[in-house]
Amino acid sequence: MSRSYKVVTYGCQMNAHDSERISGLLDAAGYVKAESDDADVVVFNTCAVRENADNRLYGNLGHLAPQKAKRPGMQIAVGGCLAQKDKGDIVKKAPWVDVVFGTHNIGSLPVLLERARHNEEAEVEILESLEVFPSTLPTRRESTYAGWVSISVGCNNTCTFCIVPSLRGKEKDRRPGDVLAEVQALVDEGVLEVTLLGQNVNTYGVEFGDRQAFSKLLRATGEIDGLERVRFTSPHPAAFTDDVIAAMAETANVCHQLHMPLQSGSDDVLKAMKRSYRSEKYLGILDRVREAMPDAAITTDIIVGFPGETEEDFQATLDVVRQARFASAFTFQYSIRPGTPAATMPDQLPKQVVQERYNRLIEVVEEVTWAENKKLIGTRPEVLVAVGEGRKDASTGRMSGRARDGRLVHFAVEPGQAIRPGDVVTTEITYAAPHHLNADGPVLSHRRTRAGDAYEAGRAVRTPGVLLGLPGVGAPRSEPAADACAR
């Protein structure tokens, strides 16, 4: 009888990317995805960046210990960034864990599980450098319409609040031909939207000596017939160049949406963070983007309460938020992450100070995003219908999806109207909130797509070397009490 598995994912897009690879590997090894919580193999794909990541993992492992004691054949595996950081300490703290694997050896998981069963002891394998690029591994993907394609892994930056470079390693770039082949394979399956994924996408190509490789890659996606939307995440302001702006503006399928991490509006704090740009340069990039694409929706990440942040520094952040006119923002309260330079910096701020500033930041962010969203009332966006985005409200008959600029749109559906996730509709915006738009009138147009056909048929695709991301890749939103994931 086939053994069942369940993958539990914490953290960023890269982890979600890896979890689809993990699922694909287990499928290929003869496991089956569990239909309930009673899986024979439970895999935790962990994050070392989010607040309380350690407590969350060990709490969940503790809950599974009695269940595992009753089921001797059950196995528990721990991978991801926290596994890369803690290594063998995980088995010491939770001796009922069977396998620990790192960010560089995802492909070893099926062998490690089998070895642990055979030897009846824990297997810990943590490599210090990448041996196999994850995109060559099999994948189980659920979405039929929106996908991620990794163009690089790792990061060469040294931001003082971030532990990712030590866990993911130095940046490794895929060749453009390999990236485009993967995109083409997705489109051949009916995918309409692809997000190019990397820790720092706009340094893509430095490894093989082409500093304009990313803008060339964006332009090349415009030659792929049937690919309707291209997004990317995330760039770094220090390396963001005008050739990328031009490629965005001149390539029809590249969405006018840009996620540009700010982190702080204070030049002193940016210097302490080792973010090699200042607020004037940051705002200058946004000006050039909007000059080329007046309809561009710009989203960001902001950290509040970095060590040494003064009230003046915080006010500088609020000033930049007001000037930048963000469409949305991921907002984070700084907290100590062991292993980062910021963890040992003096002048760590009291929790109550950080919380109070965070609350004020949220007020300003929502004031700005609401004002920007209100400008869209009466417009008619094209919406890619999504599953798991927002809600389908039985009382109002609403479904949800993403506009080309990444904004979340809830739209009304008339009884009997057969609109599927993956289809494309045109709606008229009637109401704006800080984090979403409503279209309560009739759907103006509805285009059935191959992606919608696939969703309706319930097709499960397991394709070697193909990654499709979770539905609804788009504009971020405010998130309370979390740390800034590396972007």
Image: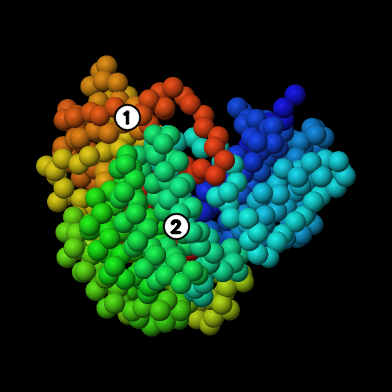
Residue 226 or residue 237, whichever sits in front: 226
Residue type marked 1:
Thr
Does residue 223 appear to the left or right of 196 in the view shown?
left
Which callout, 1 or 2, points at the residue further toward the start of the chain?
Answer: 2
Which amino acid lies under the numbered mark 2 shown in the image of this protein?
Pro
Query: In terms of depth relative to the viewer, which is nearer, 75 or 391?
Result: 75
The answer to which quarter of the image holds residue 464 is top right
Residue farthest to the top, as pictured: 416
The residue at the point 42 percent across, 27 percent down is 454
Q: Which residue is mark 2?
A: 176
Q: Is residue 265 above or below residue 374?
A: below
Residue 452 drawn at (x, y percent): 36, 28
Q: Which mark is residue 449?
A: 1
The image shows a total of numbered marks equal to 2
The residue located at (75%, 45%) in the rendering is 111
Classed neighbour count for the residue bearing mark 2: other residues with Cα under 10 Å, few (<14), some (14–19), many (≥20): some
Up-down: is 134 above or below 401? Answer: below
Asked if one can make out residue 85 in the rendered structure from this viewpoint, the answer is: no
Query: Closer to the camera: disc 1 or disc 2?
Result: 2
Of the pair 173 and 397, the residue shown nearer to us? 173
